[in-house]
Amino acid sequence: MKKTILYTLIMLLYSMGIKAQINLVGVANNYPDNIGIVKWQALNPESVTTFPSILNGYYFASSAFDSYNSKYYITGISANNSGLYSFNTITNQENLASASLYTNISEFDMSTGIMYNLKLETDEYISIYAYDINTNQDSLIGVIYEPGVNGIVVDAIGFDANNGILYYVGFTNDPALCLYAIPVRDNQFSFTRTILNTTAPNNNITSVNFDNVNEILYARNATFDENYNYTGSSVVEINKTSGDVISRGELVEFPYFVGGSSSFDQNTGTFLLVGIDTSNMAKMIAFNTYENTYVTGFVPGNVSEIVCDNTVFVQNNYVITGVKPEQTFNFSIYPNPVSDILTIDCPTVGKATVQLISAFGKRVFMQDFASGKKIELNLSSLSPGVYTVNLTSEGKTASEKLLVR
């Protein structure tokens, strides 16, 4: 009984921590005279800060967040100009510049700050561009010929920053729903197309987001019957190899959703989107992908084009360390997730130094161990969350991700 109470308390603290950990950004269209930029922490009404902007309008589903440079982007319209609007969430500075290739099917590579865009310049031909916002330089990576396709699905793109793979969910001419995987860092253009094994006679998959900790692709799946009557929505995982669409949780009380409102917090593994419940109230949905449960709550009024500010995650995982390199040696940790005793199988013969780094870059543990194949650590005092285990031996370092519950 005591253990059950303790576990419940830990999970309660974890849920409360979501409010303080997840930073969101969006635009408010009810700000006096102009569009406002809104920053807040998920589910926390006391954290809202609104900044007036130079914008009079913006394009639907055109928002993206560059966590490498801490900038919120959207295609904006002012009284005198239109183009790519940026807002720096650290300095709160804004800018509006021309950017012809920025589309509403865009995603950033967290490890480089490069943006990738999909554009249907002519029917049946999907062009993929790399766009360096800092230099305003773009380059055509390649073109996908898809006979019969005359449009691109918005809000259906995610990016694997560890391996440099752009994912997009769209339709073929069959018509079939499929997953495109495009390794954009390769010198030679290529892609794979996997037909999705959908869960209903008709499916609409949007709100695609990539979990760069566990390398899992998530989305919202709206299902329809044979007569195209809506039957419900769920958070799903898309198997990148088989094309299986795996339900993680039904969003039963939400018949409608706000377009362009989905995001993913890399630190906590939380899939976020805004739903409209049966009372016609807008609520933020925070779906815990580790537990397949969700909580709902506050979202600022009339705010859309919501993105997650993953700057801290990027600083800790890519900016400081660079794109994850090949391990200089391998070690294993188990169990993972862990709640108390963690075992580390270490292949080295010399002294080993073990460090645990929190998702916010704080070192919470460091200790030297004598040579040996197994190291045991009691982690019961650590707060739940995602950590990095660094093992250094004989001048070489390797890392593994760890979830503490």
Image: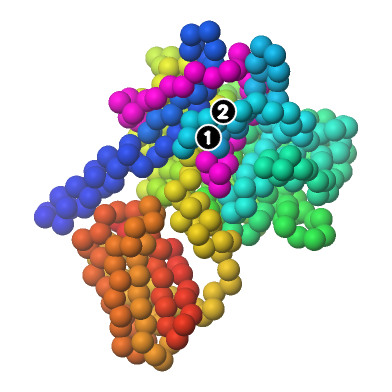
User: Where does residue 290 sit, x and y in percent of width and height?
Assistant: 40, 50
Mark 2 surroundings within 10 Å by alpha-carbon count, few (fewer than 14), some (14 through 19), many (20 or more): some
| Residue at position x 27%, y 73% in the image | 377
Q: Can you tell which quarter of the image residue 404 is in?
A: bottom left
Q: Nearer the viewer, residue 373 or 132?
A: 132
User: Where does residue 89 sit, x and y in percent of width and height?
Assistant: 48, 35
Q: Which of 25 and 266 is in front in this view?
A: 25
Distance between the alpha carbons at the discs numbered 2 and 1 = 6 Å
Mark 1 surroundings within 10 Å by alpha-carbon count, few (fewer than 14), some (14 through 19), many (20 or more): some
Q: Can you tell which quarter of the image residue 222 is in?
A: top right
Residue 325 placement, left or right of 371: right
The correct choice, above or below, for 131 with respect to 96 in the image is below
The part of the chain drawn in magenta is 43-70
**Label 1 sits on what residue type?**
Asn
Residue 258 placement, left or right of 394: right
Task: Residue lying at the far top in this picture: please name it.
Answer: 33
Q: Do the residues labelled 2 and 1 touch (CB within 8 Å)?
A: yes
The correct choice, above or below, for 242 with respect to 108 in the image is below
Task: Residue lying at the far left in this picture: please name it.
Answer: 2
Q: Can residue 188 be seen in this view?
A: yes
Q: Can you tell which quarter of the image residue 12 is in?
A: top left
| Residue at position x 54%, y 78% in the image | 328
In the picture of the structure, the residue carrying the numbered disc 2 is 94
Q: Is 212 colored magenta in this rendering?
A: no
Give the SS element for disc 2. Answer: strand
User: Where does residue 349 sit, x and y in percent of width and height?
Assistant: 41, 91
Q: Residue 88 carries which label?
A: 1
User: Where does residue 205 sit, x and y in percent of width and height?
Assistant: 62, 36
Quadrant in the picture for the N terminus: bottom left
Residue 229 placement, left or right of 314: right
**Label 2 sits on what residue type?**
Glu
